[in-house]
Image (spheres, rainbow, N blue to C red):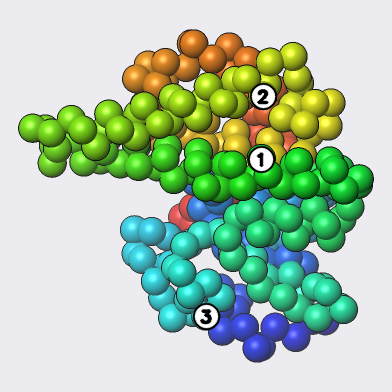
Amino acid sequence: MADLSAFPITKRWPAQNPNIIQLYSLQTPNGAKIAIALEELGLPYEAHYISFATNNQKSAEFLSLNPNGRIPAIMDPNGPGGKPIGLFESGAILLYLAEKTGQLLPPDAVGRYETIQWVFFQMAGIGPMFGQFGHFFKFAAEKIANNSYPMERYRDEAKRLLGVLEGRLEGRQWIMGEAYTIADITTFPWIRGANIFYGGREVLDYAKFPSVMAWLERCIARPASAKGLNIPVKPE
């Protein structure tokens, strides 16, 4: 049995099975990515609910694994060289899982780097810009009632990014063509989330991006997505 005693996070969120991947997350776009990938890969894991309501992500135990205080994070008892490894940042975790299993990432160098660039496109563009749009559109609307600039700035940038994605997906089933990859997994929860969490479908003119919308439906319809989007379950 793996010894996880070197990881303080396990004292607050004990592992029932320390021999499998431990996921610390929430049902947010970033959190869902990792659960979806784990389901796609068929890797056994335990999911631990990190409550924002009680600032679990700021606790000393969580910060010991992710000093940035954000979900998701994982701990793999069977890391490189058979030693435990802890990781944070959803993009880094997706790359790790893909390389660990040899799945969800093209085996050739050109395809691999092309996939990675689209992962970075989401991490550097869609995630931050959609997140800022949602903040000003839904959560800070009253604070900027007399200044529409912040919401309009991020709304317009989010729509521009949707246009880039639309161009990429025209004539393609997935971002990389016929192969479903971590580029799809990292991106679609944010497109879905901008509507689910922020109610932004109309404001972001989703109807003007038919290739993106069709792709989004294909992503959501995958069995691993249906399960992963609802993990972890909030404790009763």
Quarter assignment of residue 81: bottom right
Q: Is residue 173 above or below residue 39?
A: above
Residue 148, percent from left and from top = 18, 30
Residue, x 84% and y 41% (percent of image)? 111
Of mark 2 and mark 1, the one earlier in the sequence is 1
Q: Residues within 10 Å of mark 1 (few under 14, many from 20)?
A: many
Q: Are marks 2 and 1 in contact (CB under 8 Å)?
A: yes
Of mark 3 and mark 2, the one earlier in the sequence is 3
* Residue receiving disc 2: 168
Q: Is residue 229 left or right of residue 127?
A: right
Q: Is residue 37 above or below residue 225?
A: below
Residue, x 68% and y 28% (percent of image)? 219
Q: Is residue 44 above or below residue 231?
A: below
Residue, x 59% and y 26% (percent of image)? 165
Give the camera-side residue of 235 and 90.
90
Q: Amino acid at mark 1?
A: Trp
Q: Nearer the viewer, mark 3 or mark 2?
A: 2
Residue 53, percent from left and from top = 34, 58
Q: Amino acid at mark 2?
A: Arg
Q: Residues within 10 Å of mark 2 (few under 14, many from 20)?
A: some
* Residue receiving disc 1: 118
What secondary structure is marked by label 3?
loop
Quarter assignment of residue 230: top right
* Residue receiving disc 3: 64
Q: Amino acid at mark 3?
A: Ser
